[in-house]
Image (cartoon, rainbow, N blue to C red):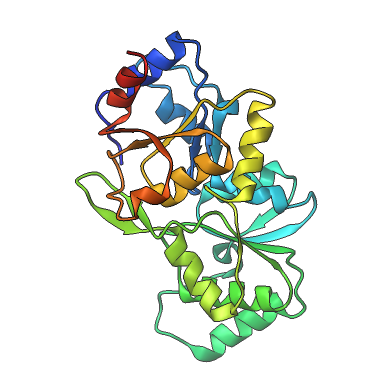
């Protein structure tokens, strides 16, 4: 949401003052890097954009310059595709006056799919959290994947946390619809998957990762393990139900502020 977790800004300032360089990785695929930078540079924080990583950029490590890519998701994915020198296309770019929310017309759908999938001139389909997803998105993506386009998911988080302890369907819920219809498993990019690991390693070079901090054991906890780093578990976001004994939790705190205070005692 639009609120900062209490104490987080001061906690990050404490890290910097103790000669630690924070790197931020979000599975949020719909925000652009500049939007994330604007939100992080708050109350005196000065976060360099090179230290802001997201699942869209991780996913587009599989995209090559000159490729044509259908994306189902937000402008964060579009930006990441463009950064690779590829051409991003959304279903909305192709509808040409068709309103997907009009009364359903089967023949119109068939003609739409036929026009853009036969022959298939798309190299890849990248799917993330899509707030305006419609049946045309799912149908076209499915046919492109069945005809050989690479199927890449930014992440497969089942839910997306909001303030007030609310959650909405996450990218994993969108990906699942296309995975089911295409009967094809995607390559998943975000935490804790290998593409995310590669992206972090390319960002930090030979620097040591002292700790990975996060609130979801199945993503952040596993990410820490793959990065061979200590895991700091904070309980200020997702209400986690996974078995904590399966993860090597080095520090456990209510939030980042408390974790940092404990660590530097």
Residue 28 picture location, percent across and down: 46, 46
Question: Which residue is depicted at the point 70% across and 77% down?
Answer: 117
The vertical placement of 125 against 48, above or below, is below
The vertical placement of 52 against 165, above or below, is above
Q: Pick out the residue farthest to the front.
A: 245
Question: Which residue is depicted at the point 49% across and 21% down?
Answer: 47
Q: On the image, which quarter does residue 2 sit in?
A: top left
Residue 42 picture location, percent across and down: 37, 21
Residue 217 picture location, percent across and down: 40, 48
The vertical placement of 6 against 96, above or below, is above
Q: Pick out the residue farthest to the left.
A: 164
Question: Which residue is depicted at the point 67% across and 74% down?
Answer: 144
Decide if residue 8 is on the left or right side of residue 144: left
Question: Which residue is depicted at the point 50% across and 52% down?
Answer: 74
Residue placed most toward the observer, 232 or 65: 232
Decide if residue 190 is on the left or right side of residue 259: right
Decide if residue 194 is on the left or right side of residue 237: right
- Residue 156 visible, this angle: yes
Quadrant of the frame with the N terminus: top left
Residue 16 picture location, percent across and down: 46, 13
Q: On the image, which quarter does residue 14 sit in?
A: top left
Residue placed most toward the observer, 242 or 124: 242
- Residue 98 visible, this angle: no
Q: How many marks?
A: 0
Residue placed most toward the observer, 185 or 86: 185
């Amino acid at each position: 949401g639009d609120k900062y977790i209490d104490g987080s800004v001061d906690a990050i300032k404490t890290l910097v003052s103790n000669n630690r360089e924070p790197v931020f990785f979000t599975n949020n695929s719909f925000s652009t890097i500049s939007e994330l930078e604007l939100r992080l540079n708050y109350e005196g924080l000065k976060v360099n954009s090179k230290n802001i990583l997201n699942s869209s950029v991780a996913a587009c490590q599989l995209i090559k310059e000159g490729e044509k890519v259908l994306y189902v998701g937000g402008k964060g994915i579009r930006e990441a595709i463009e950064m690779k020198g590829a051409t991003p296309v959304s279903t909305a770019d192709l509808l040409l006056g068709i309103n997907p929310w009009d009364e359903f017309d089967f023949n119109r759908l068939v003609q739409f799919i036929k026009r853009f999938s036969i022959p298939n001139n798309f190299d890849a389909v990248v799917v993330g959290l899509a707030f305006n997803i419609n049946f045309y998105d799912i149908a076209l993506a499915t046919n492109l994947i069945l005809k050989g386009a690479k199927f890449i998911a930014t992440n497969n988080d089942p839910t997306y946390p909001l303030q007030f302890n609310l959650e909405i369907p996450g990218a994993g819920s969108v990906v699942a619809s296309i995975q089911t219809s295409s009967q094809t498993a995607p390559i998943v990019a975000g935490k804790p998957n290998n593409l995310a690991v590669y992206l972090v390693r390319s960002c930090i070079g030979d620097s040591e990762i002292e700790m990975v901090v996060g609130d979801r054991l199945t993503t952040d906890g596993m990410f820490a393990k793959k990065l061979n780093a200590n895991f700091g578990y904070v309980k200020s976001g997702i209400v986690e139900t996974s078995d904590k004994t399966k993860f090597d939790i080095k520090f456990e705190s209510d939030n980042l502020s408390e974790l940092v205070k404990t660590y530097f005692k």
